[in-house]
Image: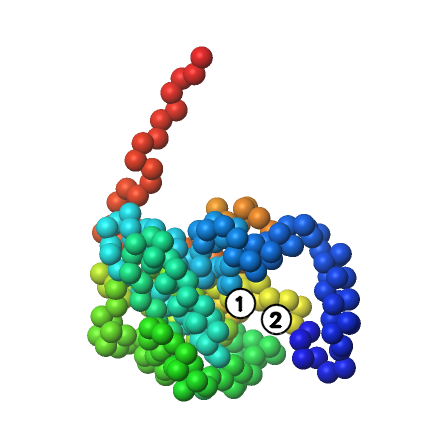
């Protein structure tokens, strides 16, 4: 680990080589790393491979823009909940710019955060054995100085979401990155999908950062982000947050399991045709 006390450069390289040797798919890992590092091929191709920074962000933004293009929507909004230090929001900005150039849809970027780090967990659903108040504090001034066009919205999300539409009149929301860690905060953030359909695409690509975890977090269906998703689905007969099944079987990339799509079956444009214009299977022979 970079900066780890007592670990020399030689030892770090030995550790990297060992990790590579133990990787179940070392050639794939090395190939993707090389493509990303050297920026080989087109941006779209690298997104397809997941050979970009924060590949889930890139994928969700691009697919949202493609859906907007098919629907004739010229501008969309993409959002990150849980900005923390700001690295994700900066990456979201970069991807939004590249996707806008590639797809031809304008993209506005918003970041929501308390600005003070995680609030205190309320009960077991917020996993107090894993999260503590004050984690992931933000240096707002430093982050604002580096942002190019993203809008940073500070305050408790339960409060700032109430006036979001009135204050910002956002273009239709097409992609949302959820990284607020706690069940309570995620539940508050999911209320974004309750805004009028004029401010939402009929299908919204979403990424949930904290639904897999490890032996410390032990995420499950009764706590954290997974519980927030389940409760949203139970309370919304015509809106469902569903795993992106097409990705789940595509490769071994962990982020493929973390991408979901919000389907609004009651949206006035949900049934608009956006697939291939001509699909036939003529008899052969």
Q: Residues within 10 Å of mark 1 (few under 14, many from 20)?
A: some
What residue is rendered at 76% in x and 56% in y? 21
Q: Does 231 appear above or below 249? A: below
Cα–Cα span, label 1 and label 2: 9 Å
What residue is rendered at 35% in x and 30% in y? 279
Expressed as whole percent of the image width and height from the top left, the position of residue 234 reads: 40, 60
Expressed as whole percent of the image width and height from the top left, the position of residue 42 reads: 46, 51
Left or right relative to 26: residue 58: left
Residue placed most toward the observer, 93 or 167: 93
What residue is rendered at 42% in x and 81% in y? 143
Residue 202 in view in this figure: no
Asked if the residue at tag 2 contacts the one at tag 1, i.e. Cβ–Cβ closer than 8 Å, the answer is yes
Label placed on residue 179: none
Residue placed most toward the observer, 245 or 171: 171
Q: How many marks?
A: 2
Left or right relative to 195: residue 281: right
| Residue that badge 2 annotates | 217
Expressed as whole percent of the image width and height from the top left, the position of residue 132 reads: 56, 83
Q: How is the image coloured?
A: rainbow
Expressed as whole percent of the image width and height from the top left, the position of residue 1 reads: 69, 74
Q: Secondary structure at mark 1?
A: loop
Image quadrant for the C terminus?
Answer: top left
Q: Residues within 10 Å of mark 2 (few under 14, many from 20)?
A: some
Q: Secondary structure at mark 2?
A: loop
| Residue that badge 1 annotates | 210
Please tell me which of labels 1 and 2 falls first in the chain.
1
């Amino acid at each position: 680990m970079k900066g780890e006390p007592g670990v020399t450069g030689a030892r770090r390289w030995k550790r990297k080589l060992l990790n590579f040797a133990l990787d179940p798919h070392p050639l794939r890992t090395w190939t993707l790393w090389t493509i990303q590092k050297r920026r080989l091929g087109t941006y779209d191709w690298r997104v397809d491979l997941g050979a970009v920074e924060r590949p889930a962000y890139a994928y969700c933004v691009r697919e949202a823009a493609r859906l907007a293009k098919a629907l004739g929507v010229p501008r969309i909004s993409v959002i990150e909940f849980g900005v923390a230090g700001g690295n994700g929001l900066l990456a979201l900005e970069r991807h939004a710019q590249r996707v806008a150039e590639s797809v031809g849809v304008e993209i506005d970027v918003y970041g929501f955060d308390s600005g003070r780090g995680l609030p205190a967990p309320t009960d077991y659903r917020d996993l107090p054995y894993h999260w503590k108040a004050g984690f992931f504090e933000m240096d707002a001034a430093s982050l604002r100085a580096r942002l190019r066009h993203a809008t940073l919205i500070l305050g408790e999300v339960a409060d700032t979401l109430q006036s979001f539409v009135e204050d910002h009149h956002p273009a239709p929301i097409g992609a949302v990155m959820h990284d607020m860690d706690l069940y309570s905060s995620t539940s508050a953030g999911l209320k974004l999908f309750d805004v009028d359909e004029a401010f939402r695409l009929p299908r919204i690509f979403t990424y949930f950062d904290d639904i897999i975890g490890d032996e410390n977090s032990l995420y499950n269906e009764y706590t954290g982000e997974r519980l927030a998703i389940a409760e949203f689905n139970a309370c919304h007969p015509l809106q469902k947050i569903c795993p992106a099944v097409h990705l789940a079987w595509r490769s071994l990339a962990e982020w493929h399991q973390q991408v979901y799509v919000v389907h609004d079956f009651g949206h006035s444009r949900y049934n608009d045709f956006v697939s291939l214009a001509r699909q036939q299977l003529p008899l052969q022979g």
